Amino acid sequence: MLACAAACGGSGGAADAADAADGGRVTLRVGDQKGTGMQALLEASGQLKDVPYDITWSQFTSGPPMLEAVNAGSVDVGTVGNAPPVFAAAAGSKITIVGVSEKGLGGQAVVVPSGSPITTVAGLKGKKIAVAKGSSANYHLLAVLKKNGLSFADISPQYLQPPDALAALSTGRVDAWAIWDPYTAQAQHQIGARILVDATGYANGFEFQIAGTDALGDPARARALGDFVARVRRAHTWANEHPAEWTEVYARLTGLPPGVIATAVPRNRYTDLKLDADVIGREQQVADAFAEAGLIPGTVEIADITDARYNEGAQ
């Protein structure tokens, strides 16, 4: 786990977010993953300047392990796709959705090797498909199978984190890989993978900011969380308006080849949304699909894990 601190100054207004109960500065512990690049995005957009609290960053391979850390209280907030909060809530985790944006669906994909004989979704039957369990790719794969008359019982899911899945696809140990950008772009560039089907017509493109319920219960930390969510939204606007600059900084800070990032950025524009009945209803469809497939224990009510206090500034 990689941690680094952004110790930034500031006074007045938002600075109240830094005032802990004992008069000291709040430290907001933020989870990040290469698939979202939140630290890179906030740095590139200038949103890590004049932050009135300290930030420590922890890196994760995907959303589910990040939310495990949020539940354990070692991380206060992190950004994940549509499925991790469903799995976390089903497991009784202490997590709350506090912000949402929607990204393009072209980079959420099931990919196959360039020479694969699989040309249709029907061709996935009986195949080994890599996917990170409880991730947005898990839901995309479920939706793709269901819409084409298949189920998880018709495939052999290989539950792998992205780095391991890329290696498995490149060596032929799996037949396909359900994944998201920038890994989709990485597979395209580095091993010539071909997109069999993207998420258009199958899934939402939600990207959620998820906070720990204990952090939300602390007034000073809750104010810091509100400021952080607002900075994320401003960073999204910057990325949409400065794709070339975002591509350059994202590649440099993540170590991914510029060509990979240049493919991923245009298909991942952000639209920040309010946590309203429409968003909750669309996300409820994700929870219900996992419950119906028996992939989570019981049911999850998305409204019960949503807090709309930070809606100001979203569409």
Image (spheres, rainbow, N blue to C red):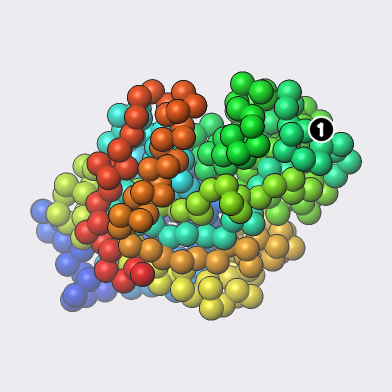
- Name which residue lies at 68% across and 43% down: 110
Q: Is residue 273 left or right of residue 255?
A: left
Question: Is any atom of residue 225 visible in this view?
Answer: no
Q: Is residue 175 left or right of residue 26?
A: right
Residue 82 at x, y = what percent? 46, 46
Residue 27 at x, y = what percent? 28, 54
Task: Locate residue 263: give its quadrant.
Answer: bottom right
Residue 151 at x, y = what percent? 60, 27
- Name which residue lies at 47% across and 59% down: 102
Front in this rendered view, residue 300 or 94: 300
Total marks shown come to 1
Q: Is residue 65 left or right of residue 52?
A: right
- Name which residue lies at 16% across and 61% down: 19
Question: Which residue does the numbered mark 1 point to in the structure image?
Answer: 171
Residue 118 at x, y = what percent? 82, 37
Q: Is residue 262 placed above or below 185 in the rendered structure?
A: below
Label 1 Cα neighbours within 10 Å, binned few <14 / some 14-19 / many ≥20: few
Task: Locate residue 196: give its quadrant.
Answer: top right
Front in this rendered view, residue 173 or 121: 121
Of all residues, the one furthest to the bottom in this rendering is 241
Front in this rendered view, residue 82 or 250: 82
Quadrant location, the C terminus: bottom left
**Given the image, on which type of amino acid does mark 1 rest?**
Thr
Q: Disc 1 on helix, strand or loop?
A: loop
